């Protein structure tokens, strides 16, 4: 496994949480590192982008759990999952504002020869580099492409 800065930070925080006996944060970081190790064992090249995918995937799992727990009336578990999301979010880059995202999508779409949704989406995801989640990017790409069709 390569020693990317993000992985170094996760391992360092793992040690810190162990020493502090902060089990909630410790378990979250262990789950992230475990998921990265699994991908490494599957011969998936571990890059910054791959680590970001793992982080987003872990957040997505927890948000789905939150929905289920809310429907089941389990406030205690909702709170636990929300706290875990906050722990994971500290490893993600700062979120890009909607305006910046829209401008980035517009610039990528204008520069792209292929105006199809998939092509623009892929280019924007690469350009944004983790500063916005897929849902926000998808909404912005649809909006920009619709505006381009009208003109």
Image: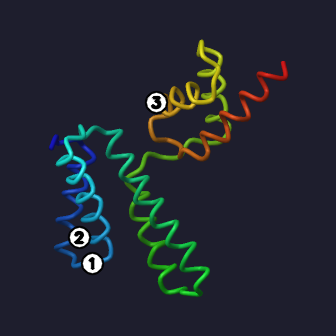
Residue 126 image label: 3
Residue 37, image x and y in percent? Answer: 20, 53
Residue 128 image label: none
User: How far is the residue under mark 1 from the one under mark 3?
Assistant: 35 Å
Residue 7, image x and y in percent? Answer: 23, 49
Point out the residue furthest to the front here: 42
Q: Earlier in the sequence, mark 1 or mark 2?
A: 2
Asked which quadrant contains residue 73, the reply is bottom right
Left or right, 22 with reference to 141: left
Contact (CB < 8 A) between labels 1 and 2?
yes
User: How far is the residue under mark 2 from the one under mark 3?
Assistant: 32 Å
Residue at left offset 72%, top offset 29%: 144
- Frontmost of labels 1 and 3 is 3
Contact (CB < 8 A) between labels 1 and 3?
no
Contact (CB < 8 A) between labels 2 and 3?
no
Residue at left offset 35%, top offset 51%: 54
As drawn, 63 above or below 41? below
Asked which quadrant contains residue 24, the reply is bottom left
Q: Which residue is mark 2?
A: 17
Q: Earlier in the sequence, mark 1 or mark 3?
A: 1
Q: Which residue is mark 1?
A: 23
Q: Secondary structure at mark 1?
A: helix
- Frontmost of labels 1 and 2 is 1
Residue 109, image x and y in percent? Answer: 63, 21
The quadrant of the picture occupied by the N terminus is top left
The quadrant of the picture occupied by the C terminus is top right
- Frontmost of labels 2 and 3 is 3
Badge 1 density bin: few <14, some 14–19, many ≥20, Cα 10 Å: few
Q: Earlier in the sequence, mark 2 or mark 3?
A: 2
User: How far is the residue under mark 1 from the one under mark 2?
Assistant: 7 Å
Badge 3 density bin: few <14, some 14–19, many ≥20, Cα 10 Å: few
């Amino acid at each position: 496994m390569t020693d990317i800065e993000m992985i170094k930070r996760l391992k360092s925080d793992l040690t810190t949480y162990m020493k502090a006996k902060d089990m909630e944060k410790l378990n979250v970081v262990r789950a992230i590192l475990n998921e990265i190790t699994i991908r490494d064992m599957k011969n998936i090249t571990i890059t910054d982008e791959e680590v970001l995918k793992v982080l987003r995937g872990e957040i997505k799992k927890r948000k789905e759990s939150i929905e289920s727990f809310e429907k089941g009336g389990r406030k205690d578990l909702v709170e636990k999952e929300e706290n875990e999301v906050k722990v994971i979010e500290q490893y993600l880059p700062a979120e890009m504002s909607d305006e910046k995202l829209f401008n980035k999508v517009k610039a990528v779409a204008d520069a792209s020869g292929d105006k199809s949704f998939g092509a623009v989406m892929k280019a924007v995801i690469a350009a944004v580099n983790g500063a916005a989640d897929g849902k926000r990017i998808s909404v912005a790409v649809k909006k920009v492409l619709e505006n381009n069709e009208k003109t």
